[in-house]
Amino acid sequence: MRALPQLMALAISLITLTLPSQALAETNRQAYNNKMTLLQVLLDGAKERASDTGDLETLCMLMSIGNDVTSRYSQLNPEDLQVKDRLGAMRNDLSLCLALLDGPRSL
């Protein structure tokens, strides 16, 4: 249980920090894909945890991070229509997660 906050802190650090040499070598899309791959691993664990323990907070938080990363990429790369479509679906998923977190009165 104590490892989850540490793992999340490590993941966020890895997402936000990039070595300058790597930043020059990668395109924006490659960097975005790398961030989302890492988030997907965390999200898969959070989904399992939510189904086992009911921990929707962690799941919604990770979905929100993915939403923010995708939104930022979409703002910087408006020509990438595939990501714009993905962002719409991600926002819908996040809204559902937050509604479930808020309880039956939201649904």
Image (cartoon, grey):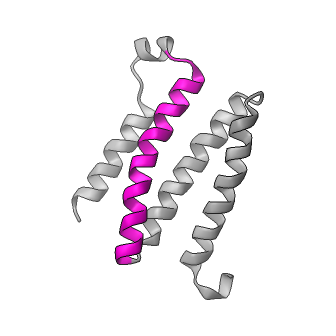
Callout count: 0
Residue at 55% x, 32% y is 32
Residue drawn at x 67%, y 82% is: 106
Specify the quadrant of the image occupied by residue 10.
top left
Residue 96 position by quadrant: bottom right
Residue 6: percent from left, percent from top: 27, 51
For the point 50% across and 17% down, the residue is 26
The C terminus lies in which quarter of the figure? bottom right
Is residue 79 rendered magenta in the image? no
- Outermost residue toward the left? 2
Q: Residue 60, image x and y in percent?
A: 51, 63
Residue 23: percent from left, percent from top: 48, 17
Magenta span: chief secondary structure: helix
Which residue is nearer to you in this view: 35 or 82? Answer: 82
29 lies left or right of 38:
right
Q: Is residue 69 left or right of residue 78?
A: left
Front residue of 96 and 13: 96
Residue farthest toward the bottom in the current orientation of the protein:
105
Percent coordinates x, y for residue 57 in the rendering? 46, 68
Region rendered in magenta: 26-53
Say if the magenta span includes residue 39.
yes
Q: Residue at the spot x=40%, y=43% of the render?
A: 12
Q: Quadrant of the N terminus?
A: bottom left
Q: Quadrant of residue 100?
A: bottom right
Q: Is residue 11 shown left or right of residue 79?
A: left
Q: Nearer the viewer, residue 102 or 89?
A: 89
Judge whether 68 appears above or below 43 on screen: above
